[in-house]
Structure formats: C-alpha cells, structure tokens
Amino acid sequence: MSDPVSRRTLLAAAAFGGGIMAASHANAASLGNPDLPPQGAINANPGSVSDPGPGNPGIASQLPSAGNPPATDVGDMPLFWSSFNTAHKRIQNGGWAREVTASDFPLSTAVSSVNMRLSAGGIRELHWHLASEWALVTNGTCRITVLDTDGRASVQDVQEGGLWYFPAGMPHSLQGLGPDGCEFVIVFDDGTQSEFGTLLVTDWLAHTPPEILAANFGLPADTFKNIPLNDLWIFQGKEPGPLAADQASVASGGSPPDPFTFALADTPPVKENASGRLLLADSRTFRISKTIAAALETIKPGAVREMHWHPNADEWQYYIKGEARMTVFGAGPRAQTMDFRPGDIGLVKKSNGHYVQNTGKEDLVFLAVFRAPEYQEISLSQWLARTPPALVAQHLQIDPATIARFPSQAPGILPL
C-alpha cells in the first residue's frame, strides 16, 4: 500500500524547492531585470498579470507597453502620451481643426498644438494670436498671407514638408489649394494658446460701432452694413489665382527681410545613415523662428533613435507615420515606456533621457519640436566616449578598451 503522507511530503518539498528557486531568481537583480522588488510580468505568476476586466481591448492593443511594460520600467511618471485621435474636431464648411492644449495634456506646459485640414479654397479667416505660430504641412499645399510690423506683406505657397512661422501678434491667413486642399500641424509657443480663442477680423469689426469703422477706414458707415455678425473662423472660399498675382498685389510695402516660410523637406539632413535621417530647422537656418526649433526624424524598421536628452527645452512630438515605442528616464529612478502611432503626441521634459524604437514594418516618421531658438542634444554614448575611459570603467565595470569603442560622433540613429 502506498504511503500518502510520503507522497504529500514529496509534493510539498518539490513545491517548496520551486518556490525557493523562483524567489532566488526574482531576488537576484540582473541586467534587464534590475529592481527590488522586481518589476514586470517576467517576475510575476500568471494570476498576478491576469486582467479579467472591465477593459477596452481596442485601446489596450494600441498601447501594449502600458499594460505590459518591460521589467526595466520603474516608478511613477506623469502621462507623456496624448493624441489628436481622441481630440474633438470642430468641423465647418471649408475644413476642420482639433487641438491639444495644456488643459488636455497637462505635461505640455511650453507648447500647445492644432491639427487642421482645409479643403481646396477653404480659408482660415484673417486673424492673429497672442502666441507665435509654427507649422508643418503634412499633406497638400497651403497659401499663407502675413503682414509684419513695418507693413511689409508676404504671400507664399507652402507644400508638404514646408514650414511657416508667424511671430506673436502678426496678422495672417491660411487657404487650402487644389486639387485636395491641405493638412498641417500647428505648434504655439504657449501651452495655453487655443485655436478656438483667437483674435478674428470679423469679430472685431462686428463689435465696433459703425461710426468708428467709418472714421477708421475713411468710408461711409453704410459700407460695412453686410459684414458678418458672427465670426467665420473656417469657411469655404474661392481658390486663389496664381501666386505671382497675389504677391504683386501686396508688393507696394516691400518684402520682409526674413522669410516666414522654410522648405524643411528640401534641406540636407544633419544626420543620415542606413538607419534613418534627421532634418533640422531652428533660428540658425529658419531665421525668423526665434522661439521654436524642430527636427523631422525618419527611423527605419528595427532601428533606434539613440539614448539622449535635450538640455534647453521640453521635446514635444507628433507621430506622422509608422509605429514607435519610447522609454523616458527621469530622476528617482523613474522609467516608463509607451507606444505611439500616427496622430499621437509625446512629451519629454527638459533633460529627461529617452530613446525611440521603430516597432513597425515601415519607416517611422515623427516631428520633434522645442520651445527654444536653437536645437540642442546630448548623446549618452558620446558623453561616455569623451569622458576619461578609466573613470567610466569605474562606474560601469567595463574594460576601458571596450569603452573606447563606444560611438563618439553622436550618430543619432542606430545601428550605423
């Protein structure tokens, strides 16, 4: 007859031994699994990672790193993910816009943003802002008009990959051109600036006494009897004629000394290799852009935007194409990972370390914007490669000869 006590003893001993092995593994910090108590699903049993709900599978599938972060993530961090995809659209005949301000994305205190679409002939009415406006055209062509403080006007057509910059207070307009209008992203150098709260020409005229309008323009008050009593904001207009004709019509005041537009897509990359490229525009090249610097970054499948940080400004990101995963590192230690897709927004606070991986099968394209006159970056590998190797070796326990092989030229995108 078998001994049930002996059988139970053997099972208990096996379970106890397995528990010791699991505990030993969990308590042994290692590369890629550094923390005590250990973090991540790799250190948990199935019951610890189960999630019976309620939940939204669609959102969970878009943000897998939030629900199953790597074991190297640790600590708390303000949410650095937002998205135009969840922003409310204001749609009118002629186009639409949606925005993400500090009210929607509290981490983004330095800049606010707008995604706008104008049909062919669609007009964003004559207006101005309390903040400066920087923009990148992502589709189609937009005709811009602007007047500077010396009465010099500019009219330009901005194509996909082109920029414009309007300093605070300078009046301007935007119009989509054929055949399919335009789409663009706007960044204001003030986190509270809203596209739905701008200074509009129709608003001011409608709220000015007729006799004042008559005195101001030197015309009978009856001239203004048909002005709109409600603002237009976006409306369907007629497509403009040739650019040269519009430019000639405003040429009497002279030309502004610094262009309000910049063809970013046509500039030579500041970094380029088999893994991708970086295009850059700041006040050194786009001279009028005194408060905004930006990089348009392309990362090939499987490549990584190197570990780095920016010492002079927060990095606001707009994901245009592809799929990405970004980890942000802060003091504490704190490290968190999130996923990004087209239309999403990321925000990395000034001097926080980060890297971006292309996790998809096509090129990853995203825009990085900084409220600063010049782009600044510090590369982790370059810093360590240009610090005395013996000193770095004492920190990392790596042979100085190996440290000498660290990339020292700040490659930007890896592998080379």
Image: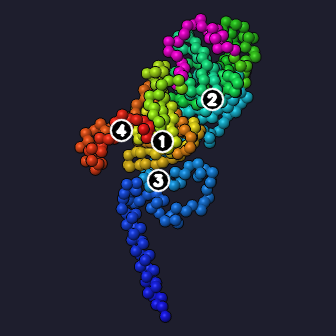
Q: Is residue 163 visible?
A: no
Q: Which residue is disc 4 drawn over?
A: 407
Residue 221: horizontal and vertical position, in percent?
A: 72, 10
Q: Is residue 287 visible?
A: yes
Label whose residue precedes the other's in the sequence (1 or 2): 2
Give the amino acid at mark 3.
Pro
Measured in 3D between alpha carbons, the distance from the residue under mark 3 to the one under mark 2, in whole angstroms, is 36 Å
Q: Quadrant of residue 137?
A: top right
Label whose residue precedes the other's in the sequence (3 or 2): 3
Q: Residue at x 52, y 16 (%)?
A: 259
Count neighbours of disc 4 (C-alpha within 10 A) and say few if under 14, some if 14 to 19, many if 20 or more: some
- Which-is-in-front pick, marks 2 and 4? 4
Label whose residue precedes the other's in the sequence (2 or 4): 2
Q: Is residue 260 magenta?
A: yes
Quick one: SS at disc 2? strand
Q: Residue at x 57, y 38 (%)?
A: 321
Compare residues 211 and 306 and report the one nearer the observer: 306
Q: Is residue 5 above or below residue 143?
A: below
Query: Magenta segment range?
Result: 241-264
Q: Which residue is disc 3 drawn over?
A: 70
Q: Which residue is disc 1 drawn over?
A: 303
